[in-house]
Image: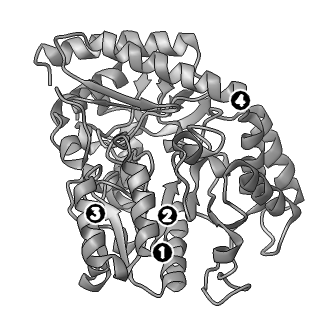
């Protein structure tokens, strides 16, 4: 840890946290060990900025890892949550607004007729796999290397996100039996997928993927790859589960499915769905969703599922996401991506990969098309670059394996500050500063 950080309030809180929280944090992605420093402790957020406990102000490109598409403490969302809280924070009973949110999701995503809310993307993934296995009478699941679908035992195999940051191939505590039900295929490797389906397709319950993978950094699908997934799933009788926890309502009104034209049998949602509060969901056609209890026999439950505060925040957020909002978000993302390429210049080889509302800067001379490519990037250079950005008041994802999250409240001023800091940081890295 740099000497200038030793006496900060963040450092003091981190020392205390280490005695009570494993690793000093409640989620691995909050740690900054992968970029060679201790984590920041945040005091508050305002629009597109974070203010830490030492009073330092940062342009925030993490935005709570995706939920805050409208920025921090948006007045309409805060008002909605405050109003809901005055009526009660939790009931353990059905509410009208749960129905309203489900109706809005159904309007936005083709093929979605019913929604079952959960409190996290991990719970949505657990429910999706259980439902797929019940619907097909099969057990095997195909996932893709570098994809992270929450900390579900059977999916913590060749996973991305924090697991990739820590360099762990899986997690201790995951049984051989759980892992044995998962087949891992290389992302964008159509030949391998076709071969696996030909060999094991009759045993497959589901193919699960992020249509825009953002947990190994943003690595878009190759042309025709998602169409191949849809074709192969249908051909072998498996369900195609699209994990839109990150991309849902971010890249387009109807998520990545609207953007790509490839539609799921089951869709996992989260992040923006809760507007910054804990919420996620599984969504799909009534024929499948009615298999869940109490309509059917596939068990799923959650005390805080459809929590009134989360539902209020989700509805308020979705109301802000109209066509002009998505055009603005796409514009901000494009300007950020183009500016990064220009800021790096020829002396610092990088790849900038983006989709509306998502971006990753890879320290690589070649485009990143799969998990091996992401792991092959210069992670030390990325870490040094991030440290320089932080020292200049810009808060990037503290991991090469995560995406940046442009928001509706990132203004010209934030872009200018970010790109000026990025250019200076690129120059230091190119000069050998690590």
Secondary element under disc 2, as helix, strand or loop, is strand
Q: CA distance from mark 4 to mark 1?
A: 33 Å
Looking at the image, which residue is at 35% across and 82% down? 203
- Measured from the top left, where is residue 301 in percent x and y? 64, 79
Left or right, residue 229 beside residue 189: right
Look at the picture and state if 196 lies above or below 3. below
- The disc label shown at residue 323, or none: 4
- The disc label shown at residue 194, or none: 3
- The disc label shown at residue 241, or none: 2
Q: Are marks 3 and 4 in contact (CB under 8 Å)?
A: no
Left or right, residue 224 beside residue 101: left
Look at the picture and state if 161 lies above or below 152. above
Looking at the image, which residue is at 49% across and 43% down? 65
- Measured from the top left, where is residue 322 in percent x and y? 73, 33
- Measured from the top left, where is residue 210 in percent x and y? 43, 53
In which quarter of the view is residue 163 placed?
bottom left
Binning the other alpha carbons within 10 Å of mark 3 as few (below 14), some (14 to 19) or many (20 upward) gives some
- The disc label shown at residue 411, or none: none
Looking at the image, which residue is at 63% across and 22% down? 328
Say whether disc 3 or disc 4 marks the residue closer to the N-terminus: 3
Residue linked to disc 1: 129
């Amino acid at each position: 840890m740099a000497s200038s950080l030793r006496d900060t309030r963040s450092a003091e809180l981190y020392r205390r946290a280490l005695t009570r929280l494993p690793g000093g944090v409640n989620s691995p992605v909050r740690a900054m060990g992968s970029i060679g420093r201790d984590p920041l402790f945040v005091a508050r957020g305002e629009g597109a900025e974070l203010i830490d406990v030492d009073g330092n102000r940062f342009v925030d490109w993490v935005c709570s890892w995706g939920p805050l598409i409208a920025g921090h403490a948006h007045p309409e969302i805060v008002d909605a949550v405050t109003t809901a809280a005055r009526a009660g924070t939790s009931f353990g009973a059905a509410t009208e607004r749960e129905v309203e949110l489900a109706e809005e999701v159904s309007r936005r995503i083709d093929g979605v007729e019913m929604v079952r809310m959960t409190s996290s993307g991990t719970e949505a993934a657990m429910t999706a796999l259980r439902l797929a296995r019940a619907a097909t009478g099969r057990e095997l699941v195909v996932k893709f290397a570098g994809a992270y679908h929450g900390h579900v035992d059977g999916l913590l195999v060749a996973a991305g996100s924090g697991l990739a940051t820590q360099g762990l191939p899986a997690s201790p505590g995951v049984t051989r039996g759980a892992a044995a039900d998962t087949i891992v295929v290389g992302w964008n490797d159509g030949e391998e997928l076709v071969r696996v389906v030909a060999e094991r397709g009759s045993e497959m319950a589901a193919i699960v993927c992020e249509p825009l993978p953002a947990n190994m950094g943003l690595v878009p699908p190759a042309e025709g790859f998602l169409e191949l997934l849809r074709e192969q799933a249908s051909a072998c009788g498996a369900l195609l589960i699209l994990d839109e926890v990150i991309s849902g309502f971010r890249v387009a009104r109807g998520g990545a499915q609207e953007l790509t034209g490839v539609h799921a049998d089951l869709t996992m949602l989260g992040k923006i769905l809760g507007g910054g509060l804990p919420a996620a969901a599984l969504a799909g056609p009534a024929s499948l969703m009615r298999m869940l209890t109490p309509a059917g026999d596939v068990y799923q439950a959650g005390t805080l599922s459809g929590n009134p505060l989360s539902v209020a925040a989700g509805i308020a957020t979705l109301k802000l996401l109209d066509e002009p909002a998505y055009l603005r978000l796409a514009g901000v993302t494009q300007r950020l991506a183009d500016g990064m390429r220009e800021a790096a210049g020829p002396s610092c080889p990088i790849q900038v990969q983006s989709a509306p509302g998502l971006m990753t800067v890879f320290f690589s001379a070649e485009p990143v098309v799969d998990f091996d490519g992401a792991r092959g990037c210069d992670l030390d250079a990325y870490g040094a670059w991030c440290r320089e950005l932080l020292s200049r008041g810009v808060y990037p994802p503290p991991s090469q394996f995560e995406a940046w999250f442009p928001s509706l409240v990132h203004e010209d001023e934030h872009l200018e500050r970010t790109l000026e800091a990025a250019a200076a940081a690129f120059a230091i890295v190119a000069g050998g500063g690590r």
